[in-house]
Image: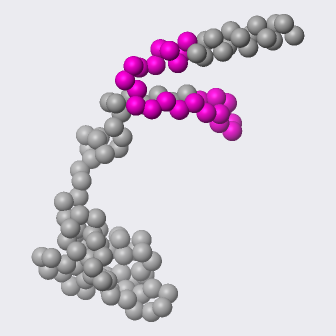
Amino acid sequence: MLKIVKISAVGAALGLGALACAPAQADSLYIGTGYHDGVSVIVRDRDDWGWRHRPDYRPFRFCTAERALDKAAWMGVRYARVNYENRSVIGVRGHDWRGGIQLTFGRAPNCPLIR
């Protein structure tokens, strides 16, 4: 019994020592227990900005016909096709569960739905 207590104390001391070695400018520290993999410690540094700051990430400057069709399909429009297109809007026509539908997307980033 005393051996188990000693091993637990040494493990706790090593764990706290590892946390003391964490970066001084860490933005977040998460300590949790997982279902299959036991205890996990996650330290996120300020240099870890995420997927938006990867070198290959390029934000969308405006909406294109392909992006409007993708958004219409995500909204549940079947057989979506571009009906009309000008410098400010893109019209998409297709079918949903009620019947025919006409959507108008703006040319701004993220293809905002106008009507």
User: Residue, x 20% and y 67% (percent of image)?
Assistant: 108
On the image, the x and y values in percent for residue 47 come to 32, 30
- For the record, the magenta segment spans 17-40
| Image: 100 above or below 103 | below
| Camera-nearest residue between 49 and 90 | 49
Q: Quadrant of residue 115?
A: bottom left
Q: Residue at x 50, y 15 (%)?
A: 20
Q: Percent from the top left, x then y, of residue 84?
A: 21, 85
- Give the quadrant of the N terminus: top right
Please, which residue is most extreme toward the right here?
1
Q: Is residue 82 visible?
A: no
Residue nearest the observer in this picture, 76 or 40: 40
Residue 99 in the image: state x and y as whole percent.
45, 92
Relative horizontal placement of residue 43, taking residue 17 as reference (left or right): left
Q: How is the image coloured?
A: one colour
In the image, residue 82 above or below residue 64: below
